[in-house]
Amino acid sequence: MSGRAIAGVRHPHALCPWRGAAPLACALAVCAFTSPPAPAQSLGGLFKQTVKQAAKQATEEIEHRAQGRIAESANQRGRVERGVAGGVVADDSPAARETALARLRSAAPWPVCNGPGAMGSVYGSTCNSREFAAPPLLVAPKLAWETRPGWWGAWSPFLVGNLMLTGSCNNDDNAGISALDMRSGKTVWRIASVCATGNRRGTTGNVGFFELPSGQVLLVYPRSDGGPADYYVLDVKAGRIAGSLKPAANVALRGLGGSFTGVNQSKQDGVSNLVGFSPTLDRVLWRNRGFRLAMAEDDRHYKPTFSPSALVDGILLLSARSLDQAEPPTRQLHAIDLRSGQTLWRHDRQPVAERGGGGEGWRSDDGTPMVAGGKAIIRVQGLLGAAANGTASDGDALRALDPRTGAEAWTTRPVAGIAIDNRVAVAGMLVAEVRRDGTHELWGYHLADGTLAWRRPVSAQARLLASAGGVFYVSERVPAASGSGQDYRLQGLDGESGTLLWTTTVPGHNLDLDGGWGIEPDPRRRGSQGPAWRIGSDGAIYGVTLTGAFKLQ
């Protein structure tokens, strides 16, 4: 069988995805954190001006639009309808804030969904939940350290114990992979030789870090001269290259918690493949060949054949286009046994979201799954009926499935006029970005049953990022204090109530604070190994800049 990496499904690697790109084409970093924290109640006046009106109008409008418009298909009749009217507008009063802080200070550590991996995962855990097993930031963080070793386009960081791995070949000095002490920011070791191979000098490259079961780190670094990628085994304690690996199949590699899979396609056989590897990549353990070839990228409905994955209890969850789907196909959530590659179950209850396109029309795409509260969470669209061809669907909702059986646990009640975007798990809650009638809101759902607990209006620029210890973080681009460019307003909010806890502003010059955190990959960031920062086990934010690295604590 011949195989090659599928267009659009290559594993994301470097913070700046364009090889040899000019520095300004990859401006994804920060200069210095010098602005003082803003008061905890500063929301640009938005919330205080609208809370009373939103509490009344949002409730009346939601109840009016939702009444009598729920599409009751056979698979929906057995569940309890869950409306949005029970959700209250979040309270940002001083009393509510103190109540939330007191509860968070005394709360026991929340058991974050995680797999067998011991190193820092890109999105918090192998469950893809954007939730990190770490204490929360209960006050506005300040800059603990910042270093500028002369990089120009740094790699997305990887946390290993007390080290942050990053670096760049796109600089004159200190080129190579560097390990920074997370406590001080000082360079512990650096391996410059990776830049001297394959015409990498002066490029950013598509670099990927993966955990190995041995406790070592796998660095996958493609060459810029057209040669095969290098699979370096890094001894992070000694700061040296301990060897190299050679994959038994040509794939776009994926790694979660020390386990490796890959995706490719065989045009000769007319299929796409999901491939399972041994821990050292030298053996193919299984192939699941039940998937379609990649779509044409100019197709208006284009999605990569395979979504990003989540891993829980030895079950790999990802959405993909199956061979036996009716036309036109969409991506369905699959549960794959990681040991055998066998498909355990497949979600096939997607509503028709758009009319036309042949057959029954385009069905809702299951997208990227996450596991939170013991459930696999996806978004479904079109529950209030299919939209006209070429228009946006209506009736977005969240659906929770049992990762082991695929049984539906709950589906939130769809509301006319809303679109659900990014999602973040926060202790026993799921927080979602919701766009409704030209407004932008955050809605907090109970993971136990899908009921809505709270909602709050936010600015159109606000973006969900990640969470730790029951607190979630939101960023917003605001005019820079210098009068030129944009800064970032970073906020911490209580997941249980939606109450604002603190606000601070960091200079936004060359900083990509919110990029890469969305549940659906941003097509503009192809080749990027996730966002430019992670949350450490101590709760601090560790990130890279265009010229260096930083710690917020």
Image (cartoon, rainbow, N blue to C red):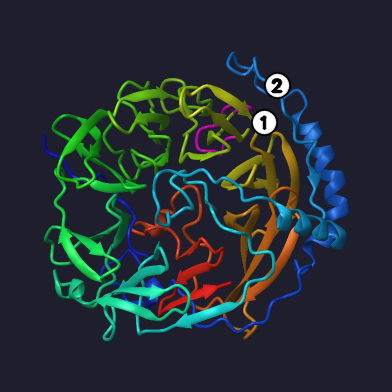
Q: Amino acid at mark 2?
A: Val
Query: Dividing the picture into quarters, in which one does residue 159 lie?
Result: bottom left
Judge left or right: residue 500 versus residue 486: right
**Residue 38 seen in render:** yes
Q: Residue at x 61, y 76 (%)?
A: 142
The circle on residue 80 is: 2
Q: Is residue 88 above or below residue 29?
A: above
Which residue lies under the disc numbered 1?
449
Under circle 2, the secondary element is loop
Q: Is residue 121 above or below residue 83?
A: below
Assess disc 2: are there few (<14), some (14-19) or many (≥20) residues with their C-alpha within 10 Å of its C-alpha.
few
Magenta region, main secondary structure:
loop
Q: Is residue 382 above or below residue 480?
A: above
Under circle 1, the secondary element is loop
Q: Is residue 467 above or below residue 425?
A: below
Judge left or right: residue 392 versus residue 204: right
Residue 93: x and y in percent read 85, 60
**Residue 387 seen in render:** no
Which range is magenta? 383-393
- Mark before the other along the chain sequence, 2 or 1: 2
Q: Residue at x 56, y 23 (%)?
A: 408
Judge left or right: residue 444 versus residue 531: right
Q: Amino acid at mark 1?
A: Asp
Q: Residue at x 28, y 62 (%)?
A: 206
Query: Dividing the picture into quarters, in which one does residue 529 lie?
Result: bottom left
The circle on residue 343 is: none
CB contact under 8 Å: marks 2 and 1: yes
